[in-house]
Image (tube, rainbow, N blue to C red):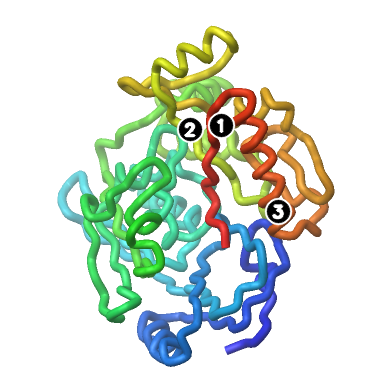
């Protein structure tokens, strides 16, 4: 166990914040042993995965635990179905590549999302027409109160848009150990409904795409407009796309004729990036922090020297300006610590 340990390399924003104590665990047994020791000290706990969805606004006065649980296994169910189980510490994109190499379909639209497998159900991560809930079978979790291992099925996870039980009433009560996905072996559902994918496939000259082609298209799109966290600190999309009542959307359409929206019954999902851009934030920099020049939904550590508080304050200014102009309150997707 380390004391006053820098977490700079454990968060993709590259924010330099210290943990009072830090340790890495390589097995569930090691994790339980660590928790038993820390329970007697009553430290606050911070579990770290890939660090891609976290903003450290201050030093952490507790125990930070890096979950280095590794391993991928598979169980063929029938001619067309396979269960793939990945431990929490596996890199997300590496899992996607593992499945594509086996020709297992279902995760291809989620290619190149940063982070580790263990945090994927927390956020119900999604991109280009697919969310975790579409392929989720179950996950194993450790109950932090009882230190017993429990299983959560699809229904118990209560997935919503970038949401789950692990971000609501289960927050701080469980740590995810492994996730099992139900994928296809033959009759793959090819999802090209997002315009960007269709356009990219046309550029690539592909008419009948495979799951590998979809992955390639998604990777090309993401690389063309999203900054690489290894090069410039960021956590991907900082805000959720807000959902507003249909009547409110129609009202806004009268004032802002080019407003974009995706109707769903009596509500409409509005792209947060469009709202932020209309408020003049695209590419704007204040001090060490900026909104990315190609994708205003992404906040970046522009100089590499930003503090978590600077990034948080920058996001608060964006929220205020969008609320003032459109009457819509943006919600942060990134977990604030």
Can residue 232 be spotted in the picture?
Answer: no
Pick the residue in front: 239 or 313. Answer: 313
- Could you tell me how far apart the alpha carbons at marks 2 and 1 are, in whole angstroms? 7 Å
Towards the viewer: 98 or 224: 224
Name the secondary structure under disc 1: helix
Picture quadrant where residue 210 is located: top left
Q: Is residue 85 above or below residue 96?
A: below
> Could you tell me which residue is drawn at 40 percent across and 23 percent down?
245
Q: CA distance from mark 3 to mark 1?
A: 20 Å
- Residue at point 52%, 57% (across, down): 115
Res 71 quadrant in image: bottom left
Image position, residue 209 (x, y; %): 42, 29
Q: Which residue is mark 2?
A: 242
Q: Is residue 332 above or below residue 129?
A: below
Screen quadrant of the N terminus: bottom right
Q: Residues within 10 Å of mark 1 (few under 14, many from 20)?
A: many
Q: Is residue 19 left or right of residue 168?
A: right
Residue marked by disc 1: 272
Disc marking residue 233: 3
Residue 220 point in image, percent of width and height? 59, 36
Q: Relative to 121, is 197 above or below?
A: above
Give yes or no for contact between labels 2 and 1 (Cβ–Cβ under 8 Å).
Answer: yes
């Amino acid at each position: 166990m380390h004391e006053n340990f820098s977490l700079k390399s454990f968060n993709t924003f590259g924010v330099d914040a210290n943990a009072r104590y830090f340790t890495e665990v390589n097995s569930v047994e090691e994790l339980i042993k660590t928790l038993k020791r820390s329970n007697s000290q009553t430290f606050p706990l911070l579990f770290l995965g890939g660090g891609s969805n976290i903003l450290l606004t201050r030093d952490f006065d507790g125990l930070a635990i890096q979950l280095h649980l590794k391993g991928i296994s598979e169980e063929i169910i029938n001619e067309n179905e396979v269960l793939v189980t990945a431990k929490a510490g596996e890199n997300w994109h590496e899992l996607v590549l593992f499945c594509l190499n086996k020709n297992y379909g279902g995760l291809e639209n989620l290619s190149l999302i940063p982070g580790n497998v263990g945090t994927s159900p927390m956020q119900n991560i999604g991109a280009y027409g697919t969310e975790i809930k579409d392929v989720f079978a179950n996950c194993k979790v450790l109950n932090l109160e009882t230190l017993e291992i429990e299983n959560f099925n699809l229904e118990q996870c209560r997935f919503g848009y970038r949401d789950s039980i692990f971000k609501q009433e289960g927050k701080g009560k469980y740590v995810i150990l492994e996730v099992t996905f139900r994928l296809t072996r033959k009759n793959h559902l090819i999802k090209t409904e997002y315009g960007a994918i269709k356009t990219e496939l046309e550029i690539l000259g592909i008419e009948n795409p495979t799951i590998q082609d979809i992955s390639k298209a998604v990777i090309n799109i993401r690389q063309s407009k999203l900054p690489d966290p290894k090069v410039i600190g960021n956590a991907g999309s900082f805000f959720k796309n807000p959902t507003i009542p249909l009547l409110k959307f129609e009202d806004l359409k009268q004032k802002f004729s080019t407003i974009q929206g995706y109707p769903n019954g009596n509500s409409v999902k509005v792209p947060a990036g469009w709202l932020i851009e209309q408020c003049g934030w695209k590419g704007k920099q204040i001090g060490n922090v900026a909104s990315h020049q190609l994708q205003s939904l992404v906040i970046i550590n522009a100089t590499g020297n930003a503090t978590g508080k600077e990034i948080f304050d920058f996001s608060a200014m964006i929220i205020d300006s969008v609320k003032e102009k459109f009457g819509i309150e943006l919600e942060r997707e990134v977990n604030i610590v």
